[in-house]
Image (cartoon, helix red, strand yellow):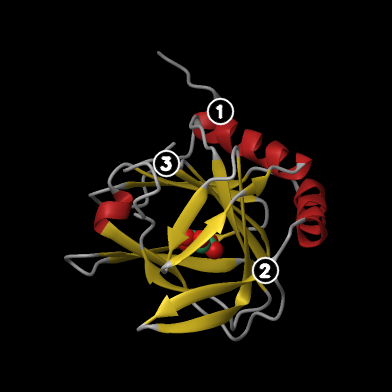
Amino acid sequence: MTLFPAEYDAGLNLLPHDGIVNYYGKIFDAAAAQAYYNALLTGIDWQPDEAIIFGKKIITKRKVAWYGDKPFSYTYSKITKQALPWTDTLLALKQAAEQHSGEQYNSCLLNLYHNGSEGMAWHSDGEKDLKKDGAIGSLSFGAERKFAFKHKQSGETVSVLLEHGSLLVMKGRTQTHWLHRLPPSTRIGTARINLTFRTIIQ
Ligand SMILES: O=C(O)CCC(=O)C(=O)O
Ligand SMILES: [Fe+2]
């Protein structure tokens, strides 16, 4: 019998086909998760997100930040951003995400949702700067929010609750075949911070 290290035991694939999504649950205890939440809230260079949609520039309430190994440029929604150098907190979180998922990442997109009225619409993370079918490691802190997947052809949906201090990993063909979103939820009055660790092609 082969025993795998507990760090790699993420249980089942949440997707029925055409991709792999593993939810590791809480990888930090409550005290560590709270300390990371506080450190990120104050220590990250949060900026309003900008996007060009139907030729119009919009500015979101949700705030974002982009960090990496190098000042990578990353283009999404027709806006190009330059990565800032890692902070100590982000390096510790990157290491934790890498150890649990058995994957490596060179950059991180952060989102700050002030309350449940802020979310993210259906999309997939298949931008050309990203490694094709590369793993994306997603850490969540703060308010628990639902995260949903929808198959691009069949319309099947799958959802999971992302807990405070939890890790979710999307890999394989997930971005090619599935959309994902963070639905708004007006009942939620507190903030959530999400970090998606990614691999940018160099
Ligand atoms: O907030 C989340 O959990 C997901 C964010 C996301 O999908 C993204 O940044 O591409
Ligand atoms: Fe995404």
Q: Nearer the viewer, residue 129 or 175?
A: 129
In the image, which is nearer the foreground, mark 2 or mark 3?
Answer: 2
Disc 1, disc 3: CB below 8 Å?
no
Q: Nearer the viewer, residue 55 or 64?
A: 55
Mark 1 or mark 3, earlier in chain = 1
Residue beneath disc 3: 135
In the image, which is nearer the foreground, mark 1 or mark 3?
Answer: 3
* Cα–Cα gap, marks 1 and 3: 19 Å
Q: Residue 91, how many percent across, how many down?
A: 69, 38
Q: Image point 24% across, 56% down: which residue?
A: 177
Depicted 103 relative to depicted 173: above or below: above
- Categorize mark 1 by other alpha carbons within 10 Å: few (<14), some (14-19), many (20+): few
Mark 2 or mark 1, earlier in chain = 1
The amino acid pointed to by label 2 is Gln
Residue beneath disc 1: 6
Disc 2, disc 1: CB below 8 Å?
no
Q: Quadrant of the N terminus?
A: top left
Q: Which of the 4 image quadrants contains residue 97?
A: top right
Q: Secondary structure at mark 3?
A: loop
Residue beneath disc 2: 47
Q: Is mark 2 within 8 Å of ligand 1?
A: no
Q: Residue 26, how many percent across, how many down?
A: 63, 48
Left or right: residue 194 compared with residue 21: right
